[in-house]
Amino acid sequence: MERPLWAPWRMEFIDAPKRAGCIFCEFPAEEGPERDRANLIAHRGPRSFTILNRFPYNSGHILVVPRAHVAALEDLAPEDFTDLHEELRSAVAVLRRVYRPEGLNVGMNLGRVAGAGIADHLHYHAVPRWVGDTNFMPVLSDTKVMIEHLDQSWQKIRDGFEG
């Protein structure tokens, strides 16, 4: 592996006490623009939504989540599956337009052993990537340099869905 993606700061997420309940069910149930900003929800579709990852690998790291609380892709109802993929397509288009990445990682971790931090509610990750976006900082100093604050990322992505 020539350029591994290091994310040691994610230990804060891993070590943090786990909330009761499911944030992917609770956050979209909280209505209003101020709650969307606090919860980092950038877009709401009919049966799915796009939310920023609070512990991103790169600026613009989003999660695309069905509203249905299921852990297995094959358990999604056909209409939820279709809407999830329409939301994913829109979200990827927004990331390309807003961030102009040279590439994207898009994928799902199904099950805790596969790396799912929230294993009971499936979701896609979409991470913008650029040549050289991993450098010496995470390796030498256990620090990731994020070039953009989460509030700025949220606003860009939210605006990207609206425009």
Image: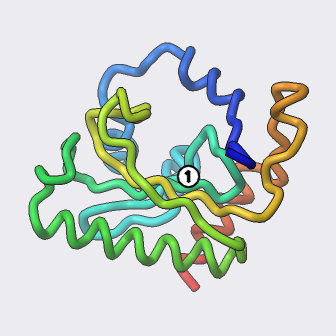
135 shown above or below 140? below
30 shown above or below 107? above
Extreme-bottom residue of the structure? 163
Residue carrying label 1:
52
Residue drawn 89% across and 28% down? 140
Q: Visible in this render: residue 32? A: no
* Residue 7, position as x, y percentages in the image: 68, 35
**Residue toward you, 118 or 112:** 112
141 shown above or below 45? above
* Residue 108, position as x, y percentages in the image: 39, 50
Would residue 137 appear left or right of 100 to someone viewing this image?
right
Quadrant of the image for the C terminus? bottom right
Q: Quadrant of residue 118?
A: top left
Would residue 30 appear left or right of 145 to someone viewing this image?
left
Element assignment for label 1? strand
Residue drawn 13% across and 53% down? 74
Q: Quadrant of residue 156?
A: bottom right
* Residue 60, position as x, y percentages in the image: 65, 59
**Residue toward you, 113 or 59:** 113
Residue drawn 20% across and 65% down? 81
* Residue 29, position as x, y percentages in the image: 32, 47
Quadrant of the image for the N terminus? top right
Would residue 29 appear left or right of 133 to someone viewing this image?
left
Q: Visible in this render: residue 151? A: yes
Residue drawn 63% across and 22% down? 11
Question: Which amino acid, by three-letter code, is at mark 1?
Answer: Leu
Crowdedness near tag 1: few (<14), some (14–19) or many (≥20) residues, C-alpha within 10 Å: many
Extreme-front residue of the structure? 1
87 shown above or below 1? below
Q: Quadrant of residue 14?
A: top right
